């Protein structure tokens, strides 16, 4: 295996004319490549400048996770002290667990629903009906989380529609929002309600790029709707799916506002996530170094997940 | 049969509607879906006209019809300026962000770009690692752009998530097309401008929509980076201030923080996006682009 | 050669352009130790720009010769915006601080002590020291002066419901429970449906919890309490057990809103205004008339009144926001005299800070009306009249010398009167290092265990035992020692 790599490299380097040995050849090739692609470096320039200025430069301050840092300014270096405090903290393990659970279930549920709905929507023939459905399902995304939460709380309260139905069936009303059993499903439902419709936008855009000829030839071969979906649509959607998946993983631990508006002390056990925990225990108490440390920890975990997912999808693509 | 006319047949209303069981189930399912989605939204709409709407007891029918919620917002002369600020900033933000993002994304879509991995990693890292508010604030302050509209646009001008989505769209364009263009003598810039962009309309339309919504919904950036220049605050900030004001002060002749007002605010905030969406949605229609260009 | 120079020049340019990003922040403030010509301020509840705030600032400049530059972040983000600015090195000369921020800022040395300034300024020297005594930190110094006095919560009750069920205003705990029962089971709104409950309330966090619920809590406090100069953890005091028993009783009987655990103040207000509950402990002042107006909007017979505290209970004085001066200000005494001194001068300055500008926010009341001033409609919202420009007229620190000059809604006035009669002051919590670290988790634990006890999933004994274990892990003894030092 190693020999094959080495010999192929040599093959490349001796391919270019007038080369003395492998190393000079590589540099020459690199310079040539860069020159050939010089336009694209200009393309990258504005974005890179913005990313550096507004993301990477501020990110340098993440080092404060290892210092004392509060209203009094930057203090002494304390190493992993804050991380130790976090891991031994009462609420941290619970917050971490909830974050993992809620985020992962949410990704699975949301992506499945989004893909299915996109596929189904794609199959709709009547343009007007399709437009109508599309317009309606993306609407919830524009409601702020405070509004969404108050809607759900209203529907699930004692005077709400759900309990009205329950009462008419002869059962006692349920205090949904304070129930550790019900909170998670309700939260995930609210998340899905708000985001799935909006998520279909990107898949529908991807689907519209599929050549209709492929469907025609498949139909001629005798494929039914389901088979067309499985063997033409889905594979074409795969790159989009994997990118969306990876990026959702990257953002997965950012659950904050949605939880803030829907949780309460009765359900901290199942609802408190890292961001809300850090907000209550860190930021509100002016413990900025602690908050930074927990945030850094959160980001590192997300980073590992993203790398892992990236490797996985690349392997799958090779198999494909 | 030519490409175009074949597609016309596909979508022609005179095409026989074969009632496949699949279509029936599909339609039923989608109808169920939209009713689940629509009921709470309908409640928001209905409540905005209901002077006695309740925050704690659910009812779908208005008890006292009133336009006061809307009147209270729209009749303020102070609404005009923030509204136009929002429109201007959304357009400006859209222009800047689409330019920066699509250029970056296209560069990353090149199969053989030396150092591509570095730039990919740069974007990826910004999705995972969040800088705190204070460091970002310090950067903005030190650049001397506090109390200007610049940070509002620049900070969000390139969103890694949207950039990767765009990169993905660019990648789906077959290399054969770009090769053919190069052989025909197009410069890389011409390839981008004349070939790639038109072919990427669905993707570009989708990302444009995302950015538009992002810029339209911004409010916190105004509050924190323009603490003194309050005349540059946008529509969302204005709406929030009405909401807060009504909750803490109330006003004669109208109940404190009335649900009608709250819901009217929600509806008014959504309307501009709803107006824009159909225009953007046109570009999601299946198949038209690829087929036409091939011909 | 040219190319190399070009490259080097480019690199230098890039480096230089990036450098300022790392530079330290400059302080955004006044000039030398001489009289400042400009003062920067962060204020939380001053007028919005559309309500002619500029006119107020112009008049201030006219009165004192100094320009005041005001930044007013939206109320919900006030603390965050101010703290971000402070952390970035931009601290304003004078700022309003919330109750949560004040001890933290003071402890970090960001503020100047105000005692000397208060004494040496003729206007503030006349103020009753009791008005700012509660803000004395553990080092004996006062770092902030309140912008209003007291205020707090009182109990509001539906007097029309009382009449409907044939009961009178409760005087004792037993009366109170009977009233709650009647409100829940005897159809007090006479609509033939069982859709009412006795007491609505918000479930607030931390020390705010103790502002509400005084009738049930009585002598108990959920947060830390200062008894005779010593600090104790209210949750483990003997009074708490009796209070918990009362909570459990009310909850079991169903005469308290069973969903109060998930209510904030807004929702609790809504419940009493919409006629779902008959009793609510809420803020005094303009809420007296507003709650009533809200209730009347739904039920024209509604009559919401404030009542005296029942036997064995008391209301509490809220520890409100303060004005503090940055330690890094060039001339803090001048800033103090200019703003705080003017505010309490019982003359033009106080009029400006309380009522606003003549002709824009208020005008002279017609002779014979019995009042000096009349408030004009709000410029931004003519449906409503102006209430104040910064200081609430009935909550002035020197109310005896500077009484309210405008007509007050009788319900507002009544709520304030009752509160003044029945309230006790609270002391500000000035936590030490360990306290600041662990107070968040401590308060979380209290709320979680409290809810479980009241709902019946934990017995009082077990709940308190659980809490003690947690409190020990969070070094409660150290926290208390710090408080008491």
Image (spheres, rainbow, N blue to C red):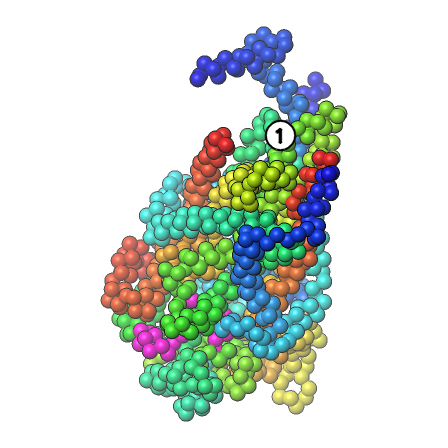
Specify start and end residues of the magenta stretch as a single range: C247-272
Label 1 crowd bin: few (<14), some (14–19), many (20+), radius 10 Å: some
x and y percentages locating residue A215 in the rendered image: 61, 40
x and y percentages locating residue C136 in the rendered image: 42, 64
The chain letter under disc 1 is B
Dividing the picture into quadrants, the one containing residue C330 is: bottom right
Is A257 located above or below residue B48 in the figure? above
Instruction: Assess whether residue C199 is covered by the magenta stretch.
Output: no
For the C terminus of chain B, the image quarter is top right
Q: Under tag 1, what secondary structure? A: loop
Main SS of residues in magenta: helix
Residue located farthest toward the bottom when viewing the structure as drawn: C166
Left or right: residue C399 versus residue C369 is: left
Q: Nearer the viewer, residue A45 or C143?
A: A45
Dividing the picture into quadrants, the one containing residue C258 is: bottom left
Instruction: Assess whether residue C255 is covered by the magenta stretch.
Output: yes
What residue do we see at 56% from left, 47% from top? A119
x and y percentages locating residue C239 in the rendered image: 29, 73
x and y percentages locating residue C237 in the rendered image: 28, 68
For the N terminus of chain B, the image quarter is top right
Q: Nearer the viewer, residue C322 or B129?
A: B129
Q: Is residue C217 visible?
A: yes
Q: How many marks?
A: 1
What residue do we see at 43% from left, 47% from top? A104
Left or right: residue C288 versus residue B11 is: left
Residue pointed to by mark 1: B110
What residue do we see at 58% from left, 29% from top? B116
């Amino acid at each position: 295996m190693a020999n094959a790599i080495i010999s192929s490299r040599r093959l490349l380097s001796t391919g270019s004319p007038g080369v003395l040995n492998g190393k000079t050849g590589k540099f020459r090739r690199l310079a040539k490549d860069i020159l050939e692609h010089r336009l694209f470096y200009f393309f990258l320039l504005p974005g890179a400048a913005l990313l550096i200025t507004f993301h990477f430069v501020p990110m340098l301050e993440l080092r404060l996770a290892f210092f004392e840092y509060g209203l009094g300014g930057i203090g002494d270096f304390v190493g992993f002290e804050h991380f130790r405090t976090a891991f031994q903290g009462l609420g941290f393990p619970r917050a971490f667990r909830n974050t993992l659970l809620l985020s992962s279930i949410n990704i699975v549920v949301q992506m499945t629903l989004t893909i299915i709905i996109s596929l189904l929507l794609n199959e709709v023939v009547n343009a007007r009906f399709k437009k109508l459905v599309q317009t309606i399902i993306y609407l919830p995304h524009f409601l702020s989380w405070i509004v969404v939460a108050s809607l759900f709380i209203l529907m699930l309260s004692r005077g709400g529609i759900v309990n009205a139905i329950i009462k008419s069936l002869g059962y006692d009303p349920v205090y949904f929002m304070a129930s550790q059993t019900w909170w998670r499903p309700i939260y995930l439902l609210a998340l899905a309600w708000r985001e799935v419709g909006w998520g279909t936008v990107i898949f529908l855009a991807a689907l519209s790029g599929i050549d209709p000829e492929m469907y025609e030839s498949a139909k001629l071969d005798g494929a039914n709707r389901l088979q067309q979906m499985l063997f033409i649509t889905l594979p074409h959607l795969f790159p989009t799916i994997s990118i969306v998946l990876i990026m959702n993983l990257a953002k997965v631990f950012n659950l904050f506002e949605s939880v803030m508006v829907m949780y309460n002390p009765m359900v901290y056990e199942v609802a408190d996530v890292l961001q809300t925990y850090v907000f209550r225990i860190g930021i509100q108490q002016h413990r900025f170094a602690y908050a930074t440390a927990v945030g850094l920890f959160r980001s590192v975990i997300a980073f590992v997940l993203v790398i892992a997912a990236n490797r996985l999808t690349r392997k799958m693509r090779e198999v494909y | 049969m030519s490409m175009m006319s074949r597609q016309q047949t596909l979508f022609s209303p005179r095409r026989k509607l074969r009632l496949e069981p699949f279509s029936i189930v599909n339609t039923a399912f989608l109808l169920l879906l939209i009713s689940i989605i629509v009921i709470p939204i309908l409640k928001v709409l209905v409540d905005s006209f209901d002077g006695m709407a309740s925050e704690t007891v659910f009812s779908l029918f208005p008890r006292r019809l009133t336009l006061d919620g809307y009147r209270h917002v729209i009749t303020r002369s102070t609404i005009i300026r923030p509204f136009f600020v929002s429109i201007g900033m959304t357009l400006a933000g859209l222009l800047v962000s689409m330019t920066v993002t699509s250029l970056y994304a296209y560069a990353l879509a090149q199969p053989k770009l030396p150092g591509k991995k570095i730039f990919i990693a740069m974007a990826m890292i910004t999705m995972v690692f969040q800088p705190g508010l204070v460091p970002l604030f310090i950067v903005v302050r030190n650049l001397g752009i506090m109390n200007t509209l610049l940070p509002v646009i620049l900070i969000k001008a390139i969103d890694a998530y949207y950039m990767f989505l765009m990169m993905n769209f660019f990648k789906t364009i077959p290399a054969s097309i770009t090769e053919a263009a190069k052989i025909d003598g197009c410069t890389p810039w011409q390839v981008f401008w004349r070939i790639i962009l038109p072919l990427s309309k669905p993707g570009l339309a989708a990302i444009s929509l995302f950015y538009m919504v992002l810029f339209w919904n911004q409010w916190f950036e105004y509050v924190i980076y323009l603490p003194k220049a309050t005349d540059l605050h946008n529509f969302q900030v204005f709406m929030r201030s009405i909401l807060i004001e009504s909750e803490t002060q109330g006003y004669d002749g109208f109940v404190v923080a009335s649900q009608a007002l709250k819901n009217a605010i929600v509806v008014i905030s959504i309307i501009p996006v709803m107006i824009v969406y159909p225009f953007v949605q046109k570009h999601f229609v299946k198949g038209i682009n690829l087929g036409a260009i091939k011909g | 050669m040219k190319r190399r120079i070009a490259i080097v020049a480019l690199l230098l340019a890039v480096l230089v352009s990036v450098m300022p990003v790392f530079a330290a922040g400059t302080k955004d403030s006044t000039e030398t130790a001489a009289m400042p010509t400009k003062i920067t301020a962060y204020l939380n509840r001053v007028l919005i720009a559309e309500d002619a705030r500029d006119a107020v600032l112009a008049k201030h400049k006219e009165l004192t010769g100094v320009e005041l530059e005001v930044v007013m972040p939206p109320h919900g983000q006030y603390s965050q915006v101010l703290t971000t600015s402070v952390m970035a090195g931009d601290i304003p000369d004078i700022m309003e601080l919330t109750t949560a921020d004040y001890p933290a800022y003071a402890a970090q040395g960001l503020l100047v002590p105000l005692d000397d300034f208060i004494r040496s300024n003729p206007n503030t020297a006349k103020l009753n020291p009791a008005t700012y005594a509660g803000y004395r930190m553990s080092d004996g110094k006062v770092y902030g002066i309140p912008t209003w006095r007291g205020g707090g919560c009182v109990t509001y009750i539906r007097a029309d419901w009382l009449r409907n069920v044939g009961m009178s205003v409760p005087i004792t705990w037993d009366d109170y429970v009977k009233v709650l029962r009647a409100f829940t089971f005897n159809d007090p709104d006479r609509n033939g449906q069982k859709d009412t409950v006795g007491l609505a309330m918000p479930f607030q966090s931390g020390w705010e919890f103790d502002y509400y619920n005084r009738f049930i809590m009585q002598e108990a406090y959920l947060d830390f309490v200062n008894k005779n100069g010593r600090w104790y953890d209210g949750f483990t005091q003997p009074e708490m057990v009796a209070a918990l028993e009362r909570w459990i009783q009310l909850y079991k009987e169903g005469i308290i809103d069973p969903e109060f655990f998930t209510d904030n103040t807004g929702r609790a207000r809504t419940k009493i205004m919409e006629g779902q509950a008959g009793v609510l402990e809420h803020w005094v002042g303009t809420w007296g008339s507003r709650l009533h107006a809200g209730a009347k909007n739904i039920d024209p017979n509604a009559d919401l009144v404030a009542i005296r505290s029942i036997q064995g209970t008391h209301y509490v004085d809220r520890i409100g926001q303060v004005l503090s001066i940055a330690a890094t200000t060039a001339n803090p005494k001048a800033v103090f005299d200019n703003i705080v001194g003017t505010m309490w001068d019982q003359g033009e300055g106080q009029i400006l800070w309380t009522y606003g500008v003549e002709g824009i926010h208020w005008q002279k009341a017609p002779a014979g009306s019995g009042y000096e001033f009349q408030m004009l409609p709000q410029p931004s919202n003519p449906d409503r009249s102006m209430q104040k420009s910064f200081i609430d007229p009935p909550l002035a620190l020197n109310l005896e010398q500077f009484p309210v000059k405008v007509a007050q809604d009788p319900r507002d006035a009544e709520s304030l009167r009752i509160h003044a009669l029945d309230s006790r002051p609270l002391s500000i919590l000035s936590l030490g290092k360990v306290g600041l670290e662990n107070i968040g988790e401590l308060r979380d634990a209290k709320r979680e265990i409290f809810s479980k006890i009241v709902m019946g999933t934990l017995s009082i004994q077990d709940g308190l035992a659980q809490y003690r274990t947690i409190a020990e892990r969070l070094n409660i003894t150290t926290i208390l020692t710090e408080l008491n030092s």
